């Protein structure tokens, strides 16, 4: 396989969640990445949405780059059949390796870990440590309460309104594909 020209870091849950639409969106996202020849960079788990996005990318012939800390290999069922499988010592190392090996970030539904990853990516962008676009896939309005909270943080003057400029909300995988295509083209020009 040739080296990918565009890599997308996907943060998502290690569970499927309550709405079957989340699992479908994860599968559709993985298939979409593979169909476009874009590499999936993710947390190397084979459970929940993580496993679904990776298996769909693999089924589509996509390049997969997984990063997992040693202490989560059993818990998240480390997916060792990826194109690239990296084991780190710490969670912090995992997040850094994932972000630094991608040109864009996508956040699917998830829990505390996905929130941690999203806010670290936003904070690092705010601090000028990277300029990668962050896309929030708001499947069936999953992230609406978070978006309201971010607006509240801004109106209460704990963040500048520019915080909203550091991410783009997309409603479905079709809109995500359009946004990522725009980013991939901008990067290649």
Image: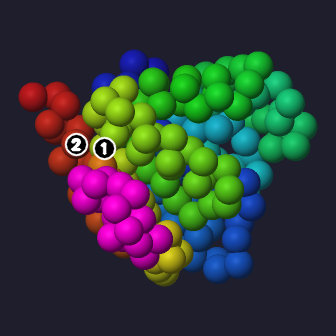
Residue carrying label 2: 183
Can residue 56 be seen in this snapshot?
no
For the point 57% across and 64% down, the residue is: 109
Q: How is the image coloured?
A: rainbow
For the point 48% across and 31% down, the residue is: 99
Residue occupying the far right of the picture: 74
Question: What distance separates the C-alpha of mark 2 from that of mark 1?
Answer: 8 Å
Can residue 102 be seen in this snapshot?
yes
**Which quadrant: the N terminus?**
top left
Mark 2 touching mark 1, by CB under 8 A? yes
Mark 1, Cα crowd under 10 Å, few <14 / some 14-19 / many 20+, is some
Does label 2 or label 1 sit earlier along the sequence?
1
Image: 12 above or below 37: below
Q: Nearer the viewer, mark 2 or mark 1?
A: 1
Q: Which of 27 and 121 is in front in this view?
A: 121
Residue occupying the far left of the picture: 189
**Residue 147, image quadrant:** bottom left
The rendered magenta stretch, by its main secondary structure, is classed as helix
Residue carrying label 1: 133
For the point 36% across and 48% down, the residue is: 134
For the point 70% across and 31% down, the residue is: 91
Image location (x, y in percent) of residue 102: 41, 30
Image: 153 above or below 57: below
Mark 2, Cα crowd under 10 Å, few <14 / some 14-19 / many 20+, is some
Q: Which of 174 and 101 is in front in this view?
A: 101
**Residue 173, image quadrant:** bottom left
Image location (x, y in percent) of residue 8: 42, 39
Task: Give the residues in magenta.
Answer: 148-164
In the rendered structure, the answer to whether residue 110 lies left or right of residue 185 reads right
Q: Is residue 119 magenta?
A: no
Image location (x, y in percent) of residue 92: 65, 28
């Amino acid at each position: 396989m040739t080296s990918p020209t565009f890599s997308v870091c996907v943060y998502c849950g290690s569970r499927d969640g309550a709405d079957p639409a989340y699992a479908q969106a994860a599968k559709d996202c993985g298939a979409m990445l593979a169909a476009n020849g874009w590499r999936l960079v993710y947390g190397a788990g084979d459970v929940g949405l993580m496993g679904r996005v990776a298996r769909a990318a693999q089924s589509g012939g996509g390049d997969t780059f997984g990063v997992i800390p040693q202490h989560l290999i059993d818990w998240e069922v480390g997916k060792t059949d990826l194109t690239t499988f990296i084991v780190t010592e710490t969670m912090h190392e995992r997040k850094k390796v994932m972000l630094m090996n991608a040109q864009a970030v996508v956040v699917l539904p998830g829990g505390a870990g996905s929130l941690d990853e999203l806010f670290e990516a936003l904070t690092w962008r705010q601090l000028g440590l990277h300029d990668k676009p962050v896309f929030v896939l708001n499947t069936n309005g999953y992230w609406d309460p978070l978006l309201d909270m971010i607006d509240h943080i801004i109106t209460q003057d704990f963040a500048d309104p520019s915080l909203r400029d550091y991410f783009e909300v997309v409603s479905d995988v079709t809109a995500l594909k359009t946004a990522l295509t725009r980013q991939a083209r901008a990067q290649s020009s």
